[in-house]
Each structure stands twice: as C-alpha cells, then as structure tokens.
Amino acid sequence: MEQLLSNQQSAVFNLADPYAVSSYVNEHLGTHSIHLSRSQAFVSNLLHRKFADFDLCRISYGSDVRVTSPALETFYHLQILLRGHCLWRNYKQEHYLSAGEMLIINPDDRVDLTSSADCEKFILKIPSAVMEAICRDQRWQTPSQGLRFVESRYRMSELGGFFDLLRMVCAEAESAEQMPRIQENYMQIVATKLLMLMRTNLTRPELNSSLATFEQIADYIKQNLKEDIDGDDLARRAHMSARSLYGLFQRTVGLTPNRYIRQKKLERVHACLSDATCGYRNVTELAMDFGFLHLGRFSEIYRKQFGELPTDTLKRRQ
C-alpha cells in the first residue's frame, strides 16, 4: 500500500510539530481536535494533494493520538490504515482497525479515533455534493435523511481491485501533467465504485414488471452497464428466481446472465475504444469505469472476444 500518495513532492510536513499538522488538517480536511498521550514535537508527517473535488492525504502523527470531531457535516472520509492500529469508537461501539482495513465515515457521524504511535493513514475526503450528483445521475433513490453508508468497516481485500483504482488516482494526482477532465472522470469512477461496493441506504430502481420479459431485462442491462450488476441482482429486480432467470437467458441467447452482462460490457468498451469521440484517454480508465478492476484478466477476455488486445484497438483508432 506504499503506492498511495508516496511522492515526496506531495509532502507538506516532514518531522513536524503535530499541532501544526493538525492545524493544516483543520483547514483542508475537516475540523477536529487532537489529544496526544505524551508531548513529542517534530515527529509528524503529512502529504496532501487536491484531485478534482477530492482531497488525498497521507498522515502520521508519530505519537499515540486521539482525534475527535462532532461531525464532518458536508463530506465523507474514507480512511485506510497503512500501518499500525486504530481504535474507532462510534455510538457505544468500539472496533480495532489494523493495517489493510478501511473505514468510511458519514457526514453526520461523530469522529473518535485513537491511533498508535506507528499508525499511518491514507485519507480520501469526498464532498457530499459529489455523491449526491452520482445518485441523481444513476437514478438511485436516497431516504429523506440523505445518503449513508450503513456498514463502515471493510478489508481492502474484500473490495476487489478498488485499491488498484486508488493507486492509479494517486499516481494521476502526482503526475507532472495535470489534466482536469481526466481527474474529473477518475473522481466519478471512484465515487461510483464506493457506492456500488459498499452497503448503503440507497434504493436502486427495479424492473417495471412483476414478470419481466427478456427484452425488458436486456434493456435494463443496457442502461446500467456501469453498475456492478449480476444474475442474482437481476433475478431479484425481475421478481423471479435465479433458476428461472438462468433458463430464460439460456433459451433466448444461449448464455448465462453473468456471461451476457460481461459480453455487453465488453461490447460497450470496444465501441468506446474504437470511437475517437468517446472521451476516454486510456484503456485502464475505460475498463475501470465498466467494472473491470482486474486489468490483466480484462485484457485476456477482451482478446478472446475481439481477437486483439484493447491497447491494439485504441492504437488503431489513434
């Protein structure tokens, strides 16, 4: 996980006063207070980059520290433990987090985190407005109290290739060539993946019939190719058993629902790679947007489908 914001050109503080680091965090990442178990000056480090509407931060206080805040109010915090451990207190619950675990904090959550002296974190600050815009674009319904992540703790290994996506975001943020449009695309992908991979209180639209036809299901897939949909999800939305859905697809197109979904995603990716007006800069960005988080596996199935690697399709377009 050392690839997450590791360029020293991103460094803001190096072996600095923890309270100076805290003051900077208050200005850029969210209002909070720190409480050190013992006074240790000039041991804190912080790297920070803006990325579209995101803030990327890598921080270590170098001392046992308790960080508290009444609430984040207008943004979400995604925190990944890179080293050490952290105690998270939340509404009469306590959980220990260790390296490789991730915490998502809602805007109205109280923040109470106690970190070990060797703890280092990567923090992604996401404005609420970004999440709300994605929900509107995807036609996802939010309750009156707003979007919330209902499960806060995850291991990075549970989220497939999400870490690889963050790694590429950090590399893009630290590249010499800053391209705002590309950063905006990556931001949309990251925020959408979070909403699809983690448990939320969102309600996603169902298919419109209590006994959906294949044409209705196929149209739903076409309209939601960037979503993380599978056969079980389709069966629930189509109000039929997984076995009935499987039989419907086998009779109609000779494919399982999951193979059909993957084929349609690949066809859309191929069309974009072949179209100079599509707007994607590279294969990685496009593959991630359609849910192909394991890029080596994606290239192989793409080659089997179209007889060439995705990079070859892109080169021919250029």
Image: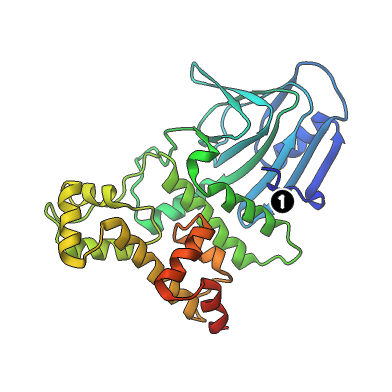
Q: Nearer the viewer, residue 184 or 297?
A: 297
Number of residue marks: 1
The picture quadrant where one finds residue 290 is bottom left
| 183 lies above or below 74 | below
| 142 lies above or below 182 | above
| 112 lies above or below 153 | above
The reply to whether residue 182 is visible in this rendering is: yes
The reply to whether residue 239 is visible in this rendering is: no
Q: Going 85% across and 39% down the picture, which residue do you hit?
A: 14
The picture quadrant where one finds residue 211 is bottom left
User: Type of residue at label 1?
Assistant: Arg
Residue 266 image position (x, y, % from top left): 40, 67
Q: Is residue 50 left or right of residue 135?
A: right
User: Where the N terminus falls, by quadrant?
Assistant: top right
Residue at which label 1 appears: 49
User: Where the C terminus falls, by quadrant?
Assistant: bottom right
